[in-house]
Amino acid sequence: MPDAITKVVELFKQVWGGLGLTGRALTVLVGGGALTALLWMVFSTHRPDMTTLFSQLNPSDAGAIVDELKSGKVSYRVVDGGTRILVPSAVVHEIRLHLATRGLPQGGGVGFEIFDRTTLGTTDFVQRLNYQRALQGELARTIGQLKEVTAARVHLALPQPSVFTEQEKPATASVVLNLRPGARLTPEQVRGIVHLVSSSVEGLNADRITVVDTSGKLIARPAEGRLGAGSTGQFEAQEAVEGELERRVRTMLEEILGPNKATVRVAAQMDFTSVERTEERFDPRGVIKSEQRTTETQQSVTASPAAVAGVASNVPDQTATPSQSGQSTAKSTKEAETVQYDVSKVLERKVFSPGELKRVSVAVMVDGTYKPVPDGKGGERKEYVPRKSDELEKIKVAVKNAVGFSAARGDEVEVVEFPFDTSATEKERALMEEAERKAFWYSLVKPVLMGVGVLLVLVFGLRPLIRSLKERRLPTFDTPGMLSMSQPGPTAIETGPDQAPALDVASDDPLRTGLMELARNNPNVVAQLVRAWMVKRPS
C-alpha cells in the first residue's frame, strides 16, 4: 500500500510538473468546482427537513426553549425575528412532549408554578402578591388559547379584605389582547372572555372588566350590561342579531348547495326603547261584596168571647181559630235581604326590555350549476345551467323557517340566482396547484440535477486537462544507439499487423535494459510516448 501511494504521488508530481500555468489553473478550478458541487449535493440531500416547533413566541419562552434544545443537542433554527423556532420534522412531536413536561412555552407569564419555589420565610404580603401574579398568568394563558388571539395580558386590582363592609372596595380587571392579523372577536367571544375573568376572580363583577386590544381599541366597556347603554351598544346588539341570522342561513345553504355557492345578507330593525307601563282596569259588571238575609216570624194567642162574631175574621193576616176554651192564635212572618255590590279593579305593571325585533329583511343570492362541455380545442369548459324555479322556491321556504319569518311583522325574504364570478378564486387555486406541482417535481428532480451537474463539471472540466496532457511536450531519450523512426526499413505499420519490426538492438545493450526498466517503473509515461510517436509520425 505505501508503494502504491508513493507511485501515485510521483505520478501526480510528474503530471503536475508537465503542466503549464494555464493547465494548473484549470486543474485547480475544475477540481475545486467539482468538490464544491459534490459537497453541496451531499449536504443538501442529507440535510433534515425543518418544521415549525412553536411560533409567535415571546423572548422569554424562546430563550428557554433554545436552552432546552441546546442541552438536548437538537439542531434548530430561529427565524422571524426570534418568534419562530424550526426543528427537524422527524423529532418535532417528541420535542413538544419533552418541552411540555418542562412547562414550556409558558405563554408570557408565570402561573401557579410560582408556588413550587416558595420558602419558609415568605411573608403574607409576598404570598398575596404571588397569588395575584399566578392568577393573572393563568388567565392570560387560558385567553391565549383562542385561535384569534396570539397573546394576552391580564391585570387584576384586588383590594385587601376589610372587616368593615362600608370600607370594602370592588375588584377590577383589565385584559389586553394581541389579535392575529385580520382576526376579529365576535360579541359572544368578548362576553365569554369577560365572564371567564369574572368567574375566576372572587368578588369581581362582569361590569368592572375592561377589554382592549394592542391598538387601543375598546372591546368591552365596564358597566355595559344593558343593551340601551348607548348607541354603540345598540349597534353591536343589532350586528349580533344580524350576524346570528346570517350564520344560520349561510350554514344551512352551504350544506345544501356546497361552499361558496350562496351569499346571504340580513337587515334587522330593532326597537331599543325601554318602556315601563302600569295599567289599572275596572270591571263594569258588579261584583257582590257582601250579602245578608233576615227572616222574622211572630205568633200570639188572644182570648176573645166566643159570641163575638166576625171580629177575628176581619183582622188582616190573622186567622181566628175557634177553640174549645174560646181563645184565638195570631201568626206573622217577616223576611229581609241586603246585598252590597262593589266595582272590580285590576292593576297591571309591565316592563318592556330594549332590543325587540321589529322587522327582518333577508337577501339571498345563489349560484347555478355548471356542466362540462367541449370548448372546440380538445379541452373542456364549464357551462352555466340555471336552477329550476321550484328549487328556488324551496330554498326560499327554508330561509323563511331559518330566520323565523313573520308576515305580521312585515318580514321580507328574497332569493335570486346569478352566476358567481369565480375567476379570482380559480386563479388563486390554479396558482396554489401550480406551486404544489412545482414543489413536488423539484423534490424529485433536485437530486438528479445535482448529479448531472457534477457529471458535466467532471466531463467538460477534465476534457481540456486531458487534452493538455496529451499535447504536452514528452521527454525524449538522446541515446546514441536508440532506434530512430526515420531510419529506412520496414515499420510496424508497413509490415502489417502480424509482423513486428526488427530491432537492431543487442540483448545485452544498456539501451534495451534502460527502456525495459522505464517501461516497468513508468508504464503510463512510456505508453504516452509511444502514442505521441504514432500521432506525430509523418504520413
Image: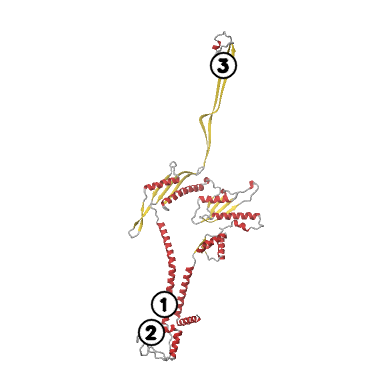
First in residue order: circle 3 vs circle 1 = 3
Disc 2 vs disc 1: Cβ atoms closer than 8 Å? no
**Is 97 above or below relative to 478?**
above
Viewer-nearest residue: 487 or 421: 487
Disc 3 vs disc 2: Cβ atoms closer than 8 Å? no
Q: Which element is circle 2 on? A: helix
Residue highlighted by disc 2: 534
Q: Is residue 433 left or right of residue 53?
A: left
Q: Is residue 83 visible?
A: no
Residue highlighted by disc 1: 463
Q: Is residue 483 left or right of residue 104?
A: left
Q: Which element is circle 3 on? A: strand
Dot 1 amino acid type: Arg
Q: Which element is circle 1 on? A: helix
**Is 374 above or below relative to 206?**
below
Quadrant of residue 303 within the rendered picture = top right
Viewer-nearest residue: 398 or 6: 6
**Is 283 above or below relative to 86?**
above
First in residue order: circle 3 vs circle 2 = 3
Residue 50, image x and y in percent? 50, 64
Which residue, as the protein is rendered here, is positioned at the far top?
307
Disc 3 to disc 1, C-alpha distance: 162 Å
Q: Residues within 10 Å of mark 1 (few under 14, many from 20)?
A: few
Circle nearer the viewer, 3 or 1: 3
Circle nearer the viewer, 2 or 1: 2
- How many marks can you see? 3
Dot 2 amino acid type: Met
Residue highlighted by disc 3: 331
Q: Residues within 10 Å of mark 3 (few under 14, many from 20)?
A: few
Residue 269, image x and y in percent? 46, 45
